[in-house]
Every structure is written in C-alpha cells, then in structure tokens.
Image (spheres, helix red, strand yellow):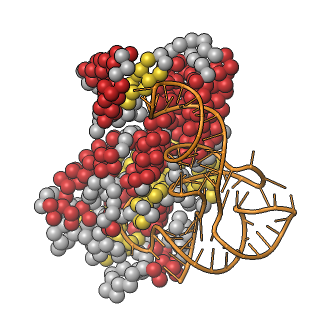
Amino acid sequence: MPIMIQNSLTRKKEEFVPVEPGRVGIYVCGPTVYGHSHVGHAKSYVTFDVIVKWFRASAFDVLYVQNITDVGHLTDDADEGDDKIEKAARSGRVHPLEYVDTYMRSYFSDMEALGIAHPNFYVRATQHIIEQIEQIKRILAAGHAYEVNGNVYFDVSSWPEYGCLSGRRAEELIEGARVDVRSEKKDPRDFALWKSAEGTGHIMRWPSPWGEGYPGWHIECSAMATKYLGGTFDIHGGGMENKFPHHECEIAQARSAGDGDFARYWIHNNMIQVDGQKMGKSLGNAILIKDVLQDYRAQALRLFLLQTHYSRPSNYTKEGMAAAEAGVDRMTQTLARLEEASTSTDGHAAANEALFRAASEADARAKAAMDDDFNTPVALSVLFELVTASNRALAEGALGEAAGAAADVLRRHAGDVLGVLGGENGEGADDGLTERLADFLLDLRSRLRDQKQWDLSDYIRDQLAEMGIEIHDSPDGSTWTRIRESS
RNA sequence: GGUGGCGUGGCCGAACGGUGAGGCAACGGAUUGCAAAUCCGUGUAACCCGGUUCGACUCCGGGCGCCACCUCCA
C-alpha cells in the first residue's frame, strides 16, 4: 500500500513516489540556535522523527538532513534588523559561535532526551558559505537578482511563480510588505541573498564577490538541501510559520538558480498553543522542553503531541500531559505483562486465538493509519484497543506466541516508531542494589501480610510508591514495577 | 484588511454522506485485608441558521467564535 502525503505545495493528498525507488531524501528546517528549545520545537521534530521512522519501517532507505541556523537570521523584517545570534551574543559578551555552540548542545541534548533519532547529519549555515555564494552567483547570472552597495537581493518581479507555495499573489505581497521609502530594493517584495558587512561591527563575515558580508537567512536552506539531496529531491519539512516567506524564498532561489525543481513534497507541521493561547518566544510564554521533562516523561510528551495530527494545532495543558502520562503507563504495563506471558507456553486456546487475531488486526490497521499521511492519532487509538484486547486475553489465560505477537506489534509501532513506551522496570542501569532492596522489602511485606500486619505493609507500599515503585498484589504473590525513572 | 485552517462529550482528540475511534476523568459491578492494576458494564457530544439529499457531524451558503500566516519565532 502506498504512503499518502498531504502536500502543502499542491494542497492535495498525494501518493508518495520517490525520485529514486526505495529511497527518501528529506530536508527539515532546524532551529536558529539562540535559546533553549521549547515544546514548539518538540512538535516539529517529533513529527519528522516519526515520519522518518515510518519510512524506515516501511523499508525505505532514508537520507535525513537537518540544518542548524547559526548566522543570517535577522531580528527584524525588511532585511533591516540585527543578526539574531550576533545580537544575543553581544549581550552575553561572547563570540557568536560560542553562543551558537552553547545552544546547539542544548538542542541536541533535548532531542536525545525526547528519543528523537539523530538525522543522518546536521548542516550548518556557517560551514556552507561557499555553496551559498555559488548559488547566489547562479541566480545573478540567470538575471533573477541584483547587487546594490554590496548587498544582493532576489528580484521577485522576475520570478512569476513566486508565491506558488503560500498561495500569495503579487499585489497582496506588495500591499503587505512594509513600506520603506529609503530602501535600496527595487521592489518591497525583494529579499536579501547576501548582506554587506562593510562598515559594520558584524563579527561573522566572509569575503565574497560583492565584498565582505554574510548570507541572508533563506539561502542557506536552498544551498544545503540541493548540495546534499540534489536539485530535485523528495521531501522538505518545517513549521508552517515558515511557509512564507522562508520556504517560498527557498523554492525561488533553488529553481531560479537552475538547480532543479527543489522539493517535490512539502510537509508543514502546525503550531503549539498553551492553554488556548498562542505560544511564542516573543510572547514570553514559551514552555521549554527541559522544564517539561522535569515533570513528565519524554514518552508522555510524545504521546501528547502524537495524539493530535501534525497538521493541527496542539493545545498544551497540564491536564493533557497528565492524561498522556497515564496513557504511557497503561500501554507500557500491558507490554510488560505480554512479554512475561510470552515466556510461558500453551495457555487457554480460545484466548490465544483471540489475542493472535487482535494483534494482526491492530498491526494492519496501525499501518493503514500511518500510511495515510502519518495519522498518528488513529494509529494510537488502534494500539490502545490492542492494549484492552491484550489485557482481556491475558485475564482469560493467553500465553506464549500469541502474547509474543501482541507484544511485537506494540513494540514495533508504539515503541520503535512512535516512541511512547518506556519508563518501565529495568530502565536505567545501576548496580542492582535497588532491585535487591525492592525485592527484600516486598518479601518483608509479604511476611507482614501473612501476619495480617496491615499498617506496616501499607506503610511499605506507600513509601515505595513515593519513590516511584508501584506494588501489584495478586493471588500468586506480589510484584513491583518502576513507574518513573526518577523523581 | 488579505490568505489558509478550525469549531465534536467533563478535558483532549479521530474517522466517516447512513451504527460518532481512542486517551484521561466519572459512575456501578467483579477482584483485593484495604488499595493499586486489570476485567465487565454505564452515562453524557457535533457553535447557530438555512440549503442539497431518502438520509449530514460529514457537502454547499450565511452568521458567530477561535487559530495561523501576511513582520522574528518549530
């Protein structure tokens, strides 16, 4: 069955047909590293993490490239503002690249904590100045850009298809653009490809045919994506707030340079709101990933995000995160039960058969959901139905291969692709002392219970619960599981 | 003002022109020393007004509300 993608470029859901059979080249806009990452970044990068993992699970050979913007992103519109990173670095009195390094490491550590697979590689704007200059030269040679005082601007009027991605027409763009009477641009829609640093204190600067300067924000992505994925490649992803102007400009640059058609499929993730309000750095209500992970497991944040389709906004609330925590627990515990049951053999025949059937149906339905524009909310609903069916079958005595089959479906979909399982017993290596102590306390409690010393046995249960260890009593004896890795 | 999107139970959130997924919470029962977990069962939903249709949450039109982009942000 083919994978269908809602293509922002055509505004249609289309069958995914790769440029090269069996391979996927995907470029995703990474962060401008001038602050810690927030849950908006999490939504975007979890989205593309799942998409990439699904392609890989579907036997595609994926080349996933993501950029790190470390120069050229301006604080203001109309190409008149400061470089974001230089401005921030000035206030901290450090070299811009030191500033970049700090937040890049912060970003990597957040991504790792969220279980996001490393792209095949990251690319940085400052490491591709030559490629950017070369692409600008090609655009100039094709007659779609012009130089003024060491600045190079893209000539929008010379490129009729400008607006093809965002659906904007020329008149609207002119009307919407900020009027700047003293501008050296021929047209207010024109945007900078290269900015002159002559006579400024700009630290990050490179020699170019137009004098010393630095690249505009948009050119890095078109130059790097075409370098590593080719002039025509499969997928370009990013947050929808970048659809215009950033992605629109990328298309214009790559195509006008004659490099190819650029990305054939565009995927845009929607935004995060907080308690129904827009979240943004500029509004000061951004919720940092590091802060979220103080209170909740990474798996819970992933579940929370993936229960909404990537194309729709997510509303971040404490209630939503608490619900996700509980959901992760439920699914994780059922998987543990299935794995334990799978080591036994036989079991109740009818229960085994029912479980086998539930597992294979869930597998097929989850696959169909993921193939349909990566519909993670539906895939998750299918997997939760399998959880209920599994618990029922286990209660009726299912064991062995049937339990193994159900566990396998959960591990592959919920674990490997969606990444919402975890925090269960056994995670986190220590010297085994915790295990031995917990086993000892459980044994002690069992003896107390045999003597009907309920006060003391409940005390042990409560204390262990506070440490994140949950006790389960059953007729066969008691077991414990670790609910949280820490806290 | 322009463009795109959205309005579903207590909260979150899907699909579908014809029985309205799933998660969390709530209630009753089983189980338990009491719990927890689990199982069984229950309840409550489609912003408003028109239209198309045998039939609309689903399609069309109008209204109201919200969000995003148009200006830096995933």
- Residue at image location 38% in from the left, 53% down from the top: A39
Image location of residue B4, percent across then percent down: 58, 68
Q: Does any portion of residue A279 appear in the rendered image?
A: yes
Residue nearest the viewer, comparing A432 with B41: B41
Residue that sits furthest to the left in the current view = A93
Image location of residue A394, percent across then percent down: 57, 23
Q: Say left or right for A147 vs A21.
A: left
Q: Quadrant of the N terminus of chain A?
A: top right
Residue that sits furthest to the top in the current view = A345
**From what the image shows, is residue A286 above or below residue A227?**
below
In which quadrant of the rendered view does residue A448 lie? top left
Image location of residue A435, percent across then percent down: 30, 21
Count of numbered marks? 0
- Residue at image location 56% in from the left, 38% down from the top: A384
- Residue at image location 28% in from the left, 54% down from the top: A36
Residue nearest the viewer, comparing A385 with A201: A385
**From what the image shows, is residue A373 above or below residue A426?**
below
Residue nearest the viewer, comparing A362 with A348: A348
Q: Does any portion of residue A249 appear in the rendered image?
A: no
Q: Say left or right for A203 vs A135.
A: left
**From what the image shows, is residue B49 above or below residue A451?**
below
Image location of residue A416, percent across then percent down: 47, 34
Q: Say left or right for A68 vs B52.
A: left
Residue that sits furthest to the bottom in the current view = A181
Residue nearest the viewer, comparing A227 with A1: A1
Q: Quadrant of the C terminus of chain A?
A: top left
- Residue at image location 22% in from the left, 50% down from the top: A101
